Amino acid sequence: METHEQHLGDAASQGCGLIPTITTERLVLRAFSPDDLDAYTAINADPQMRTYTGGGRPPDRESTWRAMALLLGHWHLRGYGMWAMVERATGAFIGRAGLYNQEGWPGLEAAWTVARHRWSNGFATEAGRAALDYAFQVVRADHVISIIHPDNIASIRVAEKLGLTAEYSTNLDGQPRTIFGITRSR
């Protein structure tokens, strides 16, 4: 895993700090930028993508912009967060992956979302591995979870490939969820 830091532009001078860029074999995980807005809006609006991640009305550009701002702000508040997922070979934005732990969340979560047209290429597993490595090596977490809808077989497979195992079932935001977890090897 190769890393370097990307400045947040003017925000960095106001204390927001740096978001590291992670380079894997086929991906670049980097800070979100305004150029990601259209592709991220399209991913979020895809009805198949929303099956397991949230109901309600598909997000528009404005709500996707707010979601990107929230993900960038998470880095400032927690010191870790989600990255924009970019395919190295094409430079295309294909999703997001990283760490998430909003107030009241069940724990430090490794999460991934990949554009539907890039499913079944191993990108979620590759990005998930990088997120777990960051959680254990940089954040120094002892335990990481992934929160997955029990019918989302593809995401469950990714979690299992990464070594996470089902720990318990719960209801989160009105949706059934299975909490998968992994403990740092000592």
Image (tube, rainbow, N blue to C red):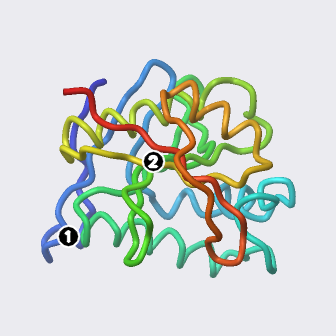
Label 1 element class: loop
- Estimate the x, y position of residue 70 in percent, counting from the top left: 44, 74
Question: What residue did someone put label 2 on?
Answer: 110
Q: Residues within 10 Å of mark 1 (few under 14, many from 20)?
A: some
Question: Of callouts 2 and 1, which one flags the residue occurring earlier in the amino acid sequence?
Answer: 1
The label shown at residue 65 is none
Which residue carries the number 1 mark?
16
Judge from the rendering whether residue 74 lies leftward or rightward of residue 176; answer left or right: left
Q: Position of residue 49 (x, y in %)?
A: 78, 54
Mark 2, other Cα within 10 Å: few <14 / some 14–19 / many ≥20: many
* Residue depicted at x 61% and y 39%: 92
Disc 2 element: strand
Residue 91 lies, with reference to residue 54, above or below; the image says: above
Q: Quadrant where the N terminus lies?
A: top left
Query: In the rendered structure, which amino acid carries the disc numbered 2?
Result: Ala
How many numbered marks are there? 2
Residue 125: quadrant of the picture: top right
Q: Say which quadrant the C terminus sits in.
A: top left
Disc 2 or disc 1, which is closer to the eye? 2
Q: Position of residue 104 (x, y in %)?
A: 41, 77
Residue 177 picture location, percent across and down? 66, 59
The amino acid type, in three-letter code, at marker 1 is Cys
The part of the image, by quadrant, that contains residue 147 is bottom right
What is the CA distance from the residue labelled 2 to the residue labelled 1?
A: 22 Å
